[in-house]
Image (cartoon, coloured by chain):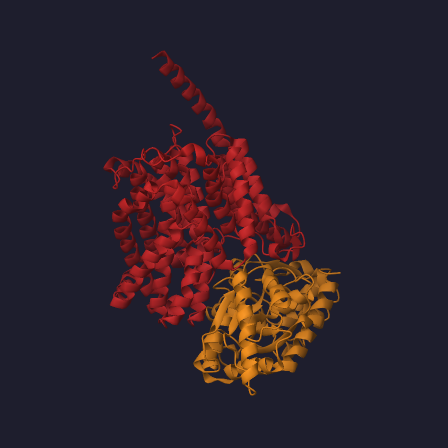
Amino acid sequence: MKSIRALCVTGLIAFASGGATTAFAFEPESPQCIAPSGAGGGWDFTCRQVGKAMQDQKLISSTMRVVNAAGGGGGVAYAEVVNKMNDDNDLIVAASSATATRLAQGAYPGNTMDQVRWVGTIGADYGVIGVAADSPVNSLTELMDQIKQDPSSVNFAGGSAVGGWDHLKVLLAAKKSGISDVRKVKYVAFDGGAEAVVQIMAGTVQAFTGDASEAKGFVESGDLKVLAILAPERLDGEFASFPTAKEQGIDVVGANWRGFYAPLNMSEEAYDFWVNSVGEVYASAEWKKTMEANGLAPLDLRGAEFEDFVRASVNDIESLSKEIGLIK
Amino acid sequence: MLETLSSLADGFGVALTFQCLALAFLGCLLGTVIGALPGLGPSNGVAILIPLAFSLGLAPTPALILLTSVYYGAMYGGRISSILLNIPGDEPAMMTTLDGVPMARKGQAGEALALSGFASFFGAFFATWGLVFLAPLLVKVALLFGPAEYFALFVLAFATLGGVASTNQAKAAFAAALGLAIAMIGVDSQTGVPRFSFGQVHFYDGIDFLVAIVGLFALSEVFVFLEHKSSLKKSDTSGIKLGRITPPLWMLRKTFPTMCRSTLFGFFAGVLPGAGASLGSFISYSFEKQLVDRENTFGKGDPRGVVAPEAGNNAAAGGALVPMLALGVPGSGTTAVLLAMLLALNITPGPLLFQNNPDVVWGLIAALFIGNFMLLALNIPLVGMFVRVLMIPTHYLMPGVAMISFVGIYGISGSTFDLIVMVVFGVVGWVLRKLDVPLVPVILGVLLGNLMEQNLRRAMTISDGDWGILFASPLSIGIWTVAVVGFILPIFMARRLRRKLEREVTASDVD
């Protein structure tokens, strides 16, 4: 971590000198994005793509430095930012629903969501629930009814661990459809969404839970039938044919958002700078293309609004996780 | 058939531009070097070069050509340090140490390198043809494998573990158990509960097998050197013979059937997502040993023991592209990184990739053929240069090994904690060497143990705890049968062999 610490120090110096001379807007001297995963992981791409967009749009004058700090499902980076880089003005950190989930479940030991500032989102991948194309089940309500009658007859397959986002959104939907004991809903964890879909095709499991972008290719090829998308309203383009859960009387929204957090004691100017910059990237035509390429749907939350959103989802996940006995 | 060939010809049209050829060459060269360096394997090699592909602003096809050349190159390169230094350059090359090192000690380093280079070419070349003609068919094979079948497959791998240890079976079993125990560390995905993490957030993701490999093999080698430093002196290197740098024809002829069989095994292991190249090279080696090792020469520098894992793991690399391209399911760490890259380039792998982006797929496949010939052309003449590594006095070489290990591991994760774990593994590796416990089964335990457990637990969840699911399909029964035979047969064979050996020994005593 020596290099990160060294960078942190240079960042501080940069701020001290910058703060003395400029009275107006803040501009980071050596902008840095921490990707709490290894090179090539999801958070790594978030950092690299947003960093490139910021530079292309001249929001930052130098290249965004991407630092990989893998470990503990993002927990290592979180602790590092809280403990050692708490007042770095040049820093943002990639985050997603998984970050909120782990914070809610205490999987970052000793850390809470109030120890950082939440900057904004750059899009969301809405959850879908699906079955094999030749399954007799045709709607989410039918599937839930089947679970009510015989919980052991439906195995959900998803790409995250038990207690992870793919699992939790099924439980949210189950609760809304009137299943009182969600612990009876069976979930099998696979390594990634595609592997889970393949098990649907192989017929070893009955239902799929994942993100819209993961399901897209298999819907086109005629292998998967999407019963519901967990979005507030139907999405555009290729996803328009997916009915929402809400349409079917199950009022549940499950978004796997992508965004950033920043150190807690960052100056107000710096925080505003990052909130605005993320907003500008989000609004650009170029980013619309990136979102389309990556299967990201609109989700535009920034600053205080985003902070409230994260708090609400942390609370939801916490109470749900207690209910299924994952945490005490 | 004809249609496929004309698509492939179109692919060559895409790949045979100056830019693509230059990128393929660069990728092969970088890949070979990355593969040879301990601590850097194909998956991080590809991950490291992704930013480069981004910043060069490459179009999808050239970017993929660069990255897959690195992938194939690293699969070739992994054998170099395995054979010369007893340090696997990456995890699938681990099995190559078993016979590669004894060959090098017998003064056949050159032969071993050249032969394994050719075996790599052979495996990769035919696996690529397999990818061309069998991809749609093989996808159906992958769909036959549910959690129960995967579990049986991993049991099969462990049942043939006896093939690895030629001396003491009990020690091999102990090493595998140690590996399985290490695999338990981290958050259990079927319950979400951290195990053996001691409250340390660093342990939540489990132990990275790369950290374990570099620690166990590379650092322990450095420790052994430090221990013997005073007794070795400089006379050490002068006695080393490098051997010829081309394999003699009889060696090629003798190993040819091995090459064919291993290519087949490796390719199928690669095709199954969630098995991968390590399983490919392991199964190729242990089956080959049980099939042809009549004189008990495996593990003592048998050329077939070098050919089997190399043909196997390179064939598996080609096979792993089948589920990656046709299903969007990565069969290995490297293909997972390639998949992420494809998504970033706005290409969704999956059942429709062959229809929607034929130029990308066929350009890629053509690039694999080109890369393969390039690698053969690069590797055989360079054998002479590689073997000179052995001429470097150990007191220069070992600090270099230590340095590359540390830089390689830190460069990937940026974690000082991983470095500490690596040093701990180094010490463990040194102790195990002292106790004469083989290191390969430890890594196999770490690599395969987790997958084996997860698949068992998945099967149990699906069946509501009914063990019958493990024997429910004809395929799983078939795999179990092979596993049982593979476990029992060598026990009887060994008894016969020992008797035969004893006879020979007494006979030679009489002489």
Q: Nearer the viewer, residue A199 or B44?
A: B44
Residue A85 picture quarter = bottom right
The image quadrant where one finds the N terminus of chain B is: bottom left
Which residue is the extreme one toward the bottom? Answer: A24
Q: Is residue B112 above or below residue B356?
A: above
Q: What color is chain A drawn in? A: orange
Residue B181 picture quarter = top right
Q: Nearer the viewer, residue B318 or B101?
A: B101
Q: Is residue B497 above or below residue B237?
A: above
Answer whether residue B117 is visible to the viewer in this image: yes
Q: Residue at x 42, y 70 (%)?
A: B347
Is B185 on the left or on the right of B39, as rendered? right
The image quadrant where one finds the C terminus of chain B is: top left
Count of labels in the image:
0
Q: Is residue B476 above or below residue B344?
A: above
Residue B190 picture quarter = bottom right
Image spot of residue B7 (x, y percent): 29, 65
Image spot of residue B471 (x, y percent): 57, 45
Image spot of residue A322 (x, y percent): 74, 63
Answer whether residue A216 is visible to the viewer in this image: no
Q: Is residue B133 above or below residue B431?
A: below
Is A241 on the left or on the right of A87, as rendered? left
Q: Nearer the viewer, residue B501 or A55?
A: A55
Which residue is the extreme one toward the top? Answer: B510
Q: What color is chain B drawn in? A: red
Image spot of residue B505 (x, y percent): 40, 18
